Image (tube, rainbow, N blue to C red):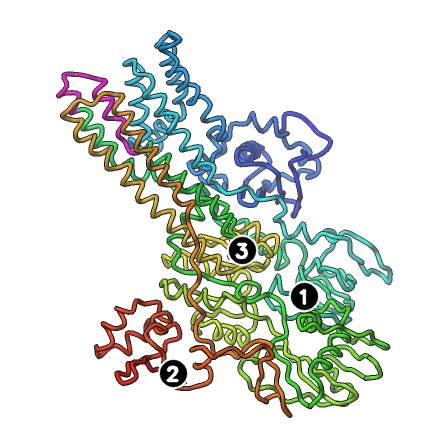
Amino acid sequence: MADGQASAPPPYLLAIPFKGPTRLRFKVALDGPGLTALEAHLSRRPEVSQVRINRFAASCVVSFGPSAQPELDQWLAQLPSERQLQQVDGDTSRPGQGSALPLADASEAGGDEPFVPTRIVLPVASLGLALLAGPLSLPPLAVAGFILVAAQLSFRRAWQGLREERKINVDFLDSLAVVLHSLDGFLVGPAMMITMIEGGEAVRDATQRIAHSANTDLLASLQTDVRLLRDGAELIVPSSSLQAGDRIQLFAGDQIPVDGLIESGESSLDVVKLTGESVPREAGPGDEVLAGFILLEGSLIIQTLAVGEATRIGQITSMIESAPVFDTRVGNYAGKIANRFVLPTLALAGLSLLLSGGNIGQAASLLMFDLGTGLRVSVPTAIMAALTKAGSQGLLIRSGRALEQLADVDVVVFDKTGTLTQGHPSVVEVALLGHADRHQLIRLAASAEQGLNHPVAKAVINHAADLGIETLPCDLWDYRIGRGVSAEIQGHSVLVGNARLLREEGLEPASASTDPRLATATPVYLAVDGVLEAVIYAADAIRPDSRQLIAELHRRGIQAHMLTGDVAAVAHAVAERLGLAPEEVHAEALPDQKAELVKSLAQQGHKVAFVGDGINDSAALAYADVSISFASGSDLARETADIVLTNDKVSGLLVAQDLSRRTFELVKQNIGIVGVPNLSALLVGTIIPISPMLAVMLNNGSSLVAAANAMRVLGFRSKDLPPANLETVAPVHAVHQGSGPEAEPVDPSSNPAPSSTAVLRSRSSVAVSLVELSSRLSLKHQAITARRRRADFAHWVRSHDPEGHSWSYCSQTKMYLSIVA
């Protein structure tokens, strides 16, 4: 039990999403060491059978034994305070208890070592004492003792390597050099070495993930007061008290807190964050609804089917909490590379000891050429510089590990809605069915829709505003849920809505458009004075840089997949416009299926990045090697993501990868900058004596040069994406003129001089110059010229063409020709 009783739970207890007789889950505001201490404390409680800590979500799940049924409120009040947790040894958890990280990884995450500023205080102080020992006539033995105390973290890592890994690591080499030089009376060298080592480790610790806020629990965000219908009465109760079978009533603006079935009422539901459908879903009696849906209009009476963790949104939370947790710092390059040279360095130092007749100082000097110091300083410096530079590029990269993993990503999985598309409907076309004035029709439609919160209505209003069209007041106005609006405006009877509204008024909707661009668009019919005058098409528009992004990923040899909860027809239509192959499209995917695809790709050996912005993407984000979201995304997606695109440009993914690759190019250079002089000096010093001071200058000098080289990442400049690929889609906001929806589209904007892209749209045979083809294929002129005489030129050029077109060379016109279907 806790050391002291308390009348209330400790302040670090934030929320209790689930409370059952044998299982309890609660959220806490504790850091890594605090979570480790809490796990150790709970593991020793006799009534607790299992403890699972998720450091990623700052969540704790406690399972009680079959015979133990504690009173949970009292049990929570007995949890130790933060001060008491600081006295708990985090390494004493019982074997077999669940943990978010193995013990070794927990220490890597910072649970066993002092906070970053503390770890460098003693090394810096020891360096100051070593430099002042001569001028101040300080006792050498006392200064040497202080240096050994300052090197305690290095000693601890060396002992950990011997005890747990059964091998001699680079920390053993550093520790041996510090001890030998200190005992030999050379104080500046070991003090400087320890300062450089711990300074580098401090910078590496600073590359760990920025802590999550505690507001990542979806279930807690759904808790609110609801209207419970029971025995003919209406009761206001907290949603957390609802049970399966309860009937609740909800109104426009309410968020549904349970999974349930609609008994009565009609409503338009905003489901985009949970299912990825950008257009609101019309719902009525018998339809199923999920926790997290938002009522845009109308009212519903819902019979509860599932509550809390049993809801779909609760399952998403559980998946996030069960996702793997990694050390978020940049990889330990000093350990990976320098450890390989430990035994050869020891062997050469031993040989030097024999050749020098037992000169310990000479042998200890060779121990300094271990590569570890330089890599410990230069690699984290490069990462920190890159994380700083990312901010000016519209990126928030939360950890060194994310930057490191991104360089090797070979598969990128995208959510559709809000990621590759804008995430909300916008007017993409207006088809005029008669000869009425276009601006006047748009004015009437926007006037009728004004004041509505429906996304399609907002799209019509925004379209009018973009064209500078002002709305008019309505004399009469009648909104019909799930149908549209009937209004009287300046003596005109106006109908704006779907086919159901027209049929109720005795009008027949226009025939569906055969334009493939409009296959996924929502038609909004506009009738004036009993005559159908226009069809306004609203669709979730593709982001301006999405198509270029997909083409560039393919050019880099990176697979691109699109995952969406939307229906297959919509998904494949969008994919075709983006340049994605059918096998790269995964439609009607539920959140758990998204996570399963990410896990499946990872199990195949791929390095997977996932880009998404919704609640339904959060589980997949948690399982990806690199997770990416937008500043405008849902709170949970933004908190789960390793990288946040603060400028909301999806092409920022490429900027982040370019920055990552540039950073690790410099890291590879630094390995050479550190390795060449140190290994050369090690070989030479085996035969020719090298003084300790020269060894310090060579080792630390190469470290400083490598650190300076690492800072070059601050000069990184992002490259513009290659020009947009040849489009097959007519301009957005084109307006049909004529007698039907299949009339010729006319772009209302100015008509610039035709480009090669425009020529390709209007002709089946295309001729381009060498310069244009080189730009299109992203190849050098010389490569195309050298290849065009070969028999396989058509196949070769098709493999480089972003849309798979074949090209041939015409010697008479000196142009390259392509036949486009």
Q: Quadrant of the C terminus?
A: bottom left
Q: Look at discs 2 and 3 and give the one toward the viewer.
A: 2
Q: Is residue 760 left or right of residue 26?
A: left
Q: Residue at x 37, y 65 (%)?
A: 555
- From the image, tell me which residue sits under label 3: 629
Work out whether residue 55 can be spotted. yes
Q: Is residue 281 left or right of residue 234?
A: left
Location of residue 192 in the rendering, given as x and y in whole percent from the top left corner: 36, 23
Main SS of the magenta segment? helix
Q: Is residue 791 above or below residue 554?
A: below
Q: Tell me the SS state at disc 1.
A: strand
Q: Tell me the SS state at disc 3.
A: strand
Q: Tell me the SS state at disc 2.
A: strand
Looking at numbered disc 2 in the image, what kind of residue is underneath it? Answer: Val
- From the image, tell me which residue sits under label 1: 270
- From the image, tell me which residue sits under label 2: 766
Q: Is residue 246 above or below residue 360?
A: below
The magenta segment is 351-372
Q: Is residue 619 left or right of residue 716?
A: right
Work out whether residue 488 can be spotted. no
The answer to which of 266 and 69 lies nearer the viewer is 266
Q: Residue at x 53, y 36 (%)?
A: 32
